[in-house]
Image (spheres, rainbow, N blue to C red):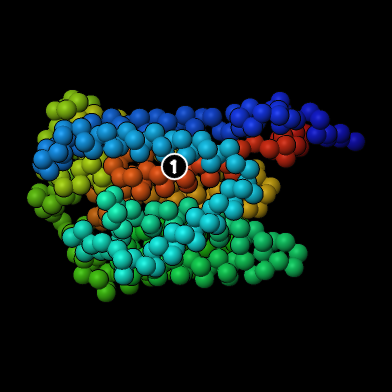
């Protein structure tokens, strides 16, 4: 008879120190990879933000200083939230969703249009984009609903989570922000898959995503123009994509050198949506590949750890958070390298922006909380070895 006992759990589960238990159970490799991404963001802030400050008549390192503050706070948020047990992370995630969803609903009445054709921000001296905070909260709330459906006599959690997701998609489409809406759809689909959905339903959900893209293309001129520009045989060299393409070609494998790039003086969004174009020009394609590798590492490592997770909430909500992080990075980088139509979406931890930085910190803190090793993981590993 196989003897499996809990007394042989790894050191740290019985540690009376909260920080001691956290350090022994948190995914330290992912924590380090996130720190590297934040350091890359600081490096790119020095490269891309100084020209913007000069154009606006501000001190040269105005945006760099702000980026440093956002980065420090974001990493502190990652650590603080990752210390929380899953139940506490769930409660705070639900509160975050409710607050952010109400804020998104009131955007048409109280939001600010910064001349980009969409009302996505509140302006209180600083700009806040509530949809950034809505995404991690949604993953936690819908993950909780799906997990509840697995309990005997539980509520119809999958249907409830789908309706909540549709409400979020509709609120984002009103802004309009179809990129974020599509990102939310992708995350819910991944969560549904992690929950155990039949493959036919997953295929149908992919069709829903395609339908959302078609609806946006046929009903919104700016979406149609971006897709048409993407499909055009030639790239307009004076467009943002054109400038980005030129920068990538100029940078080659190793780049032209730190501070020697020129695209940051031409690209309006060089410090945000197209920061990877600046990276490609100054540091080269190999540097960009390394950055992509960091995003893949964090995403795939989280999904791998979640595959062993027996708690349904942690597994489903964690899958949503990981996919949100990975797909957002893929979209941003894909746009820069002309693999996808233009879409205003920040690169987590690297693009300038307080809302994006802090929301990414919250999302990764929640993910690290849900992927911390617990005694059940030790027992599962021993079962697998035997």
Res. 100 image quadrant: bottom left
Is residue 190 visible from the viewing direction of this image?
A: no
- Residue 58 horizontal side relative to residue 8, left or right: left
Closer to us: 116 or 202: 116
Res. 373 image quadrant: top right
For label 1, the crowd category at 10 Å Cα-Cα, with few meaning under 14, some 14 to 19 and many 20 or more, is many
Say which residue appears at 58% left-offset and 48% top-offset.
89
Say which residue appears at 69% left-offset and 47% top-offset.
310
- Residue 302 horizontal side relative to residue 346, left or right: right
**Residue 316 in the image, given as x and y percentages of width and height:** 59, 53
SS at badge 1: helix
Q: Which residue is mark 1?
A: 361
In the figure, 193 relative to 83: above or below?
Answer: below
Res. 160 image quadrant: bottom right
Quarter containing the C terminus: top right
**Residue 381 in the image, given as x and y percentages of width and height:** 71, 35
Closer to us: 340 or 324: 324
Residue at the limit of the structure toward the right, as seen here: 1
**Residue 246 in the image, given as x and y percentages of width and height:** 14, 41
Closer to us: 8 or 230: 8
Quarter containing the N terminus: top right
Total tally of numbered discs in the picture: 1
**Residue 99 in the image, given as x and y percentages of width and height:** 47, 59
Residue at the limit of the structure toward the bottom, as seen here: 219
In the figure, 367 relative to 12: above or below?
Answer: below
Closer to us: 364 or 302: 364
- Residue 107 horizontal side relative to residue 202, left or right: left
Say which residue appears at 44% left-offset and 55% top-offset.
135
Is residue 160 visible from the viewing direction of this image?
A: yes
In the figure, 354 relative to 284: above or below?
Answer: below
- Residue 79 horizontal side relative to residue 349, left or right: right
């Amino acid at each position: 008879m196989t003897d499996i006992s809990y007394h042989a759990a790894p050191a740290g589960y019985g540690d009376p120190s909260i920080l001691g238990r956290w350090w022994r159970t948190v995914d330290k490799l992912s924590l380090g990879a996130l720190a590297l991404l934040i350091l890359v963001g600081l490096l790119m802030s020095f490269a891309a933000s100084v020209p913007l400050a000069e154009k606006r008549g501000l001190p040269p390192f105005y945006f760099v200083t702000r980026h440093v503050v956002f980065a420090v706070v974001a990493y502190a948020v990652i650590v603080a939230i990752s210390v929380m047990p899953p139940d506490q992370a769930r409660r705070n995630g639900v509160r975050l969703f409710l607050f952010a969803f109400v804020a998104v609903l009131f955007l048409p009445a109280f939001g600010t249009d910064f001349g980009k054709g969409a009302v996505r921000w509140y302006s209180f001296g600083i700009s806040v984009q509530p949809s950034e905070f809505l995404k991690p909260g949604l993953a936690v709330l819908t993950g909780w609903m799906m997990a509840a459906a697995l309990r005997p006599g539980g509520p119809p959690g999958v249907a409830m989570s789908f309706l909540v997701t549709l409400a979020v998609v509709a609120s984002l489409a009103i802004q309009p922000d179809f990129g974020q809406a599509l990102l939310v759809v992708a995350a819910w689909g991944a969560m549904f898959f992690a929950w155990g959905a039949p493959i036919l339903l997953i295929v149908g959900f992919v069709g829903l995503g395609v339908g959302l893209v078609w609806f946006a293309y046929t009903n919104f001129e700016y979406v149609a123009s971006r897709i048409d520009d993407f499909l055009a045989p030639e790239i307009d060299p004076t467009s943002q994509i054109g400038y980005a393409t030129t920068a990538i070609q100029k940078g080659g494998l190793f780049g032209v050198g730190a501070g020697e790039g020129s695209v940051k003086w031409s690209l309006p969004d060089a410090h945000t949506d197209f920061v990877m174009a600046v990276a490609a020009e100054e540091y080269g394609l190999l540097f960009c590949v390394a950055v992509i590798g960091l995003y893949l590492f964090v995403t795939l490592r989280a999904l791998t750890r979640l595959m062993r997770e027996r708690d349904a909430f942690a597994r489903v909500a964690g899958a949503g958070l990981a996919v949100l992080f990975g797909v957002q990075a893929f979209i941003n980088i894909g746009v820069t390298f002309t693999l996808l139509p233009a879409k205003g979406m920040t690169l987590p931890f690297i693009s300038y922006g307080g809302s994006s930085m802090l929301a990414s910190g919250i999302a990764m803190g929640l993910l690290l909380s849900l992927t911390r090793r617990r005694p059940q993981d030790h027992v599962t590993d021993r079962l697998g070895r035997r």
